[in-house]
Amino acid sequence: MLPTPEFDTSQRTELPMTPSASGLSRRAQWAGGQPISFLMHKALAHPELISLAAGFVDQRTLPVAATAEAVAEVLGDEEAGRVALQYGTTAGYEPLRELLLQRFLAADGVTAAETGLTVNRLLVTAGSNQLLHLVADTLLDPGDLVLCDAPSYFVFLGILQNLGARAVGVTVDELGVIPEALEEELERREAAGELERVKAIYVVSYFDNPRGVTLPVQRRRRIVEIARRWSKKQRIHVIDDTAYRQLRYCGEDVPSLRAFDEAGDTVIVAQTFSKSFSPGIRVGYGILPAHLVDPVLNQKGNLDFGSPNLSQHIIYNVLRSGRFDRHVARLRDSYREKLTAMLEAAERYMSPLDGVRWARPTGGLYVWLAVPESLDTGPDGPLFDQALAEGMIYVPGAYCYPAEGAPAAKNLIRLSFGVQTPENIRRGMQGLARAIQQVQ
Ligand SMILES: Cc1ncc(COP(=O)(O)O)c(C=O)c1O
């Protein structure tokens, strides 16, 4: 059995500031204690568990045939194949960037002229996580603040911690981050003399991780407006993480926050093909305000001077050939069925239980579930081990809260319906319901 690393939430607040005896940098020390490794070890150590924890995409729907065709076409031509197997440029394969920009503009229902966007503002990265990391590294010094939803995407919270920056949680409701709460947090920081340390607002604006919430248009507009108005001495950027935009199972798409940034100097868009196509190919991209392009490219130049070129050629091929759009249509059908299985199982097994409530998202990979307030869902509470005993694992909601700001609720759970079959989703939900009943 694998040793299980402990996840110590106190590491988030107390960052070591002194050099370590082993010679590690402060950044290396700040990098530890991430919940993701704790959960992965638990799942790996108990392969028999039904994991409703991992936010992975469905293994069975990964596009093997479409990718094989794309690779054959990319490498089918000797000359073009050699180009794909060579290093590319730091910003990425230009035909791909052109195509990504066109598709982004079309999705937002705007033109290049209206937005002032050109291909120079679009940068291809190895997944959107790399873009988030590069942007955070470009904007943040140790001690700087980023306002995040409470709860938020915990890997991004880890990136901030790794840089010695501070994530501040802002209160959310069922529509996403509350603009008034954002404004109050900024007022508080100003009163505390910390406004100049606020460098960014981070939102996952479509079917967010962990709650599955999509920000309505009105709030998108307000968030951009608030960021601009509070950019008094230094600019407060809005990082719009759109990782789950394509995973919509009903209703109409809404424009990204970039559509409400008329001057184009505030919003940074992060997008990825990991959820909609394949995380193994690991292509993402960012759209940046003009003043950030060179600074972010400089960071990337030092990191890898260009993301894997073959991956970019594969993504270009699948987009141009229509394989990507056909795949996403099939993916939506498959995830819709799984989401339905999870919501039906919640109805069946959870509704008889007192004080258990859950959200009903229309996209993404997650369902956010609340148990009675007295019940701690964390690894030290009674439910986590009982759920393991019942054969399932979940993500404790407390992992998703920034260390400062709106306090972490202890009675929440993130459930993912991406990986498991509908039948396993039902069994996992039944196991969780039994565990709740036993510890209540
Ligand atoms: C909200 C969010 N953003 C970004 C990512 C990163 O994905 P990738 O780096 O594979 O593009 C994830 C992955 O789970 C995510 O949930």
Image (cartoon, rainbow, N blue to C red):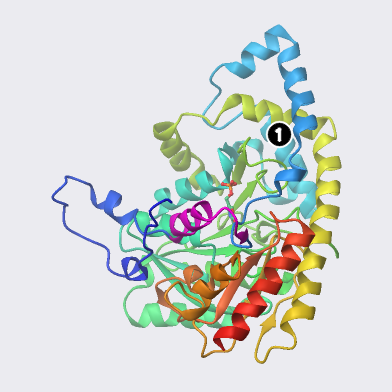
Looking at the image, which residue is at 56% across and 28% down? 308
Q: In this view, does 20 lie above or below 178?
A: above
Looking at the image, which residue is at 76% across and 63% down? 363
- Magenta highlight range: 35-50
- Image quarter of residue 34: bottom left
Residue in front for this viewpoint, 98 or 417: 417
Asked if the magenta segment contains residue 47, the reply would be yes
- Image quarter of residue 83: top right
Find the residue positioned furthest to the left: 21
Q: Residue type at mark 1: give it.
A: Glu
Give the image location of residue 24, x and y in percent. 21, 46
Name the residue beneath numbered marker 1.
98
Examine the residues drawn in magenta and state their main secondary structure: helix
Give the image location of residue 213, x and y in percent. 68, 70
Q: In which quarter of the image is the C terminus?
A: bottom right
Task: Decide if residue 213 is in sight here.
Answer: no
